[in-house]
Image (tube, helix red, strand yellow):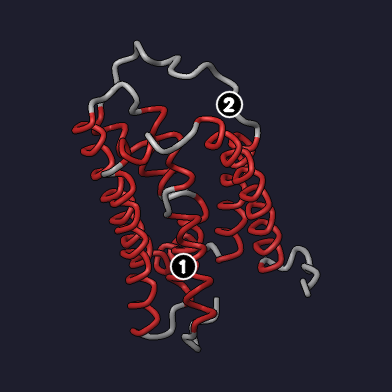
Amino acid sequence: MDFTVIDAALVGKLLLLLLIGLGPKIALVPFLEKTHAFDTETKVRIGRKMVLIAVVTALILFATGALLMRLLHITGGAVAVAGGIILALIAIKMASGPTEKPHDDIAAPVDPDKLAVFPLAVPYLLNPVGITVIIIASGEVVSIASAILVTALILIVGAFDYLVFTNIDKLAKRMKPVTMIVSEVVFGILLTAVAVQLIVAGLGNLGIITPTAVH
């Protein structure tokens, strides 16, 4: 990402990446599956805490990402490869479709507060794409304006997440199970491609390979 010139293309690209990395799509199905046994009030509480934890974590990563990379002697390329590998594991599971009977864990007691933090806030809501993009952006921002832009977009996506997950029961009534499964598989395939692209870009950044330009 080139932050030397802030234009519509940069804003659009960053917003799209954050919608993938911090938006509701990847977390939606896991949220519905893991909170099905709770009442509406508890679901709203879980959703609210999940979004808060994810957004605060994203902001902390953005504020400290560049410093962490320097302290740990890692590069943006290494972060991209690591993020791509973890994303691939999640995406392949999504693309494979449901492999377990729904609600197999119905008898298992679950702490709503712990569930909101893990695995819902991280790694589902703030997923490897979001973590990778935010850390790399932290190391590449060149001005206060670019830092404000990234922060603002994180907050905008977080506000969208809040609207979705605090109104989840209303949305769930409009979602057809078959449509959700199909969209999950399709999105899983697309995310697998994103994961591969992250890995290729990271390896290119590290000088291990020379990625072919896409026209």
| Relative image position of residue 207 (x, y in whole percent) | 72, 68
Return the residue at label 1: 15
Occupied quadrant, residue 39: top left
Q: At which x and y percent is residue 116?
A: 30, 37
Q: Which mark is residue 66?
A: none
Which residue is the extreme one toward the bottom?
Answer: 5
Q: Residue furthest front?
A: 174
Residue placed most toward the observer, 85 or 116: 116
Is 28 on the left-hand or right-hand side of 186?
Answer: left
The residues bearing labels 1 and 2 have C-alpha atoms spaced at a distance of: 29 Å
Q: Residues within 10 Å of mark 2 (few under 14, many from 20)?
A: few
152 left or right of 179? left
* Three-letter residue code for mark 1: Leu
Residue bearing the label numbered 2: 98
Query: Which quarter of the rendered picture does the C terminus lie within?
Result: bottom right
Relative to 11, say whether 112 is above or below. Answer: above
Q: Local crowd at mark 1 within 10 Å, few (<14), some, or many (≥20)?
A: many
Q: Amino acid at mark 2?
A: Pro
Which of the two discs, 1 and 2, labels the residue nearer the N terminus? Answer: 1
Left or right: where does residue 181 sit relative to residue 140? right
Instruction: Identify whether 50 is placed above or below 176.
Output: below
